[in-house]
Amino acid sequence: MSEALSLLAPFDGIAMPLQAVADPVFAGLVLGDGLAIEPLSATLLAPCDGVLSHLARSAHALTLTAPNGAELLLHIGIDTVQLQGQGFNALVRQGDAVRRGQPLIVVDLDWVARRAPSLQTMLVLTGGGFEIAGRASGRLKAGRDQFLQLAPARPTASAAGVVSPAAAALRARAQVLHRNGLHARPSALVQAAARAFAAEVQLEFRGRAANARSMTALMGLAVGELDEVLVCARGADAEAALQAVVQALQSCSGAAPVSAPPASQPAPAAPDDGDGDGGQRLRGICAAPGLALGQVLRLDRQVAEVPQQGLGLETEFARLASALKQTREEIGAAMANAAERQANEERDIYGAHLALADDPELIAATEQAVLRGDSAGHAFRQAIGAQCELLGGLGNALLAERVNDLQDLERRLLAALGHRAAGQPSLGPASILVADDLAPSDLTGLPRAQLAGLATVHGGATSHVAILARAMGIPALVAMGPALLGLRNGQQVLLDADRGRLCAEPSAAQLSAAQAQLAAQAAQRAEMLRSADRPAQTLDGQHIEVAANIANEADAREALRCGADGVGLLRTEFLFIDRNEMPDSAEQASAYQAVIDALQGRPAIIRTMDVGGDKSLPYLSLPSEDNPALGLRGIRSGLAQPELLDAQLRGLLAVRPLASLRILIPMVAEVGEVLRVRERIEALAEEMGLAERPQLGVMIEVPSAALLADQLARHVDFFSIGTNDLSQYTLAMDRCHAGLAARLDPMHPALLRLIAMTVEGAAQHGKWVGLCGGMASDLEAVPLLLGLGVSELSVSPPLVPGVKARLRTLSRVQCRADVQALLRLESAEAVRATARARWPMEAQ
């Protein structure tokens, strides 16, 4: 029998109910019940004896397991994980046994208070079979006054449908590395990993469990980024299933996210009457930046009428199966179309919707209702409604936004059953879509050329519609409040997303200014596009190649339209994703040849498959790794499975003319890797009877490659610098970590020095250096790259004209002279400030 436990106050301070803290997750008791304290002392003390079972890397939180099994979470402050450990000094380590009253963490209260929303500290009972029997109040003394009294909880029945962890089950702990935790898309990845095996797999977190095959159940656990979960698997292939699910949990998703703009303040309850210029203004949160002028198109959501009573079990089950099949096919087609267009955010969102359509718990709940006599449509609507209520009540804004995805799936399936809502009006030439809320299918199904902007009553900057709007370049405001629905169809409005407002009746002066601004932007884009075919020649006559980063033949055609001098990076992963088997050499050769043909004689740098890390493939048997970003990534995975690398090299060597092909090796760390690839190319070329060889290059994306550039240059024809990975490996900052995103700047002096070292090493052997990472499209960075000696920049096709225009305003000789001083600066901020002053953007 578990024993009662008395917990002492962890800080000097004033006790307060957990529901009163300034964080909805804790206040909503999502993590469990407990008590908070407003600290008045600087040292956190252990509330009881126990073992430190978890200590956050940022030292702002820890989990203590008491001798009787109670699990206690101590969390110092609100949003203090963003401080990355600054202001906290841990006196103990994970795994230490501690005594009641022992100092655990020293906090710089003044420093943290200036940088965090609150110092409120939460003690939460997260597991162990206990309940709270008593709470303190008022002012307390740390290590002396009682804080909480715990008593053994009465046993409860297990959740239905959850696998009981029998003695034969295999178990492993995994830390969730996905940005923002297990929301829709990461849950879909875990679901897909679990469904590939016959074994039953469940996740356990904070005393609750979920079927790993159910995306909705996984989201319902409310697992956050860096949270640790227990994975249990049982069955014939339990070991493989366990490894696959752990890897899916520990893979960092969102490697190159379309980041949300800084959110403006939430919309006021009442509309803003303006500042004397123009009419009524409505305020909201900027979901996608930009300015739009157009006519309101109301998208008033109509609810399809669905009969409750079914037509018999056989009929309704057949209708349900047919509708599910049609829905999956529609989503799969939309997903394939997005992948073909390299619309990765859209593709991933549809991938999550496809996982929802396969969710076993949703389908089981629907089938149970059909067995009770409900129609398929009514049963599915009720199952979706139950999941929406669950996610909406978790106190997690990101998960609440996934309710919209579930409702989108409901509308799709009901339409497949023949239950369609009334039609919507068609778009005009410049429509601003106004709705209570929008689903991804609402947005992707509309003609982009006619959509000027969008505004919604609800929603958030992290919703899937907001992500799509940013990716599509559509100005958008969300969370505008019910006053938005006072707008009428056809009414002219001015949407200024950057300033977080919509002017319902713009004045003549406002209209004139907006039209002038939009015209100037359009003229600038048109002029850059007209001159895009011209070479990017600097003021002192130096020609710099501006190429395009692409994924397929369609992108290659778009790159030519935008004036690209060739392809600086073809990511071959598009051939390998969203399928259950690897494409053979013939299929690969056909895809590569299509790109070469589309370029009409221009060169193409094609990178060999870069998988591993955050890019896993279901048919590629890579082991689960504690740190995938430092494991079998890039060429390492190819060398570990040479048959896969050989198949790709055969496909590449089959293209004609070989003179247009440049093969790029990713994630090279040492000369030996290059020599092994070179050896395979030679052997395969001889086997294929080829007299000609394509150029071979190395991607410089780990520091060792930059440091060994002079050695690598002896064995290759060119270098291409990938600043995205080079930044994270040089600065030891995970590029998927939301809290570090602002500090992961390629303008850091350390990165600039590595680029300079790479160029210098290449020059010793007469080799050229290109750059294909995100830094190439940063117009503030272009003068530095020019001065450092980079001779090719590769960017997304639409950005080619702007980069070329920027280069034409610069002198390479002058940039080379000026950049040396920037290498001696001490921070990325200092480099950017100096670059802005020396090469102002207005110079274009």
Image (cartoon, rainbow, N blue to C red):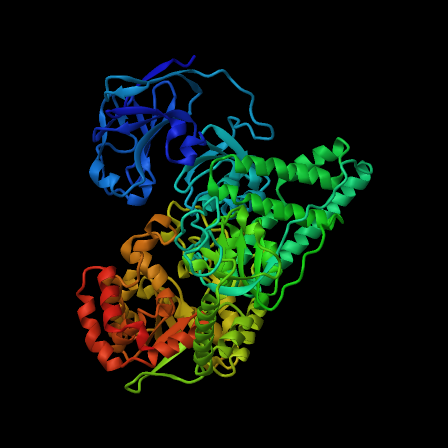
Q: Residue at x 44, y 36 (%)?
A: 229
Instruction: Where is residue 95? Give x, y as percent.
Output: 30, 30
**Quarter of the image where one finds residue 729:** bottom left
**Between 414 and 516, the one nearer to me in the picture:** 516
The quarter of the image holding the C terminus is bottom left
User: What residue is shown at x 62% (from left), y 58% (from top)?
Assistant: 489
Which residue is the extreme one toward the front?
Answer: 276
Which one is nearer the viewer's eye here, 27 or 711?
Answer: 27
- Please count the marks in the image: 0
- Residue at 43% x, 45% y is 180
Tell me where residue 586 appears, x and y as whole percent.
Answer: 58, 69
Foreground residue among 626 and 484: 484
In the picture shown, does residue 106 fall above or below 65?
A: below
Q: Position of residue 424 (x, y in %)?
A: 68, 56
> Where is 147 relative to 494, above or below?
above
Q: As drawn, which residue projects farthest toward the bottom?
A: 541
Q: Looking at the picture, does residue 602 appear above or below residue 643?
A: below
* Residue 49 on image: x %, y %: 29, 20
Instruction: Please determine whether, in this image, residue 666 is positioned above or below residue 844.
Output: above
Whether residue 773 is visible: yes
The N terminus - image quarter: top left
Is residue 46 visible in the rendered image? The answer is: no
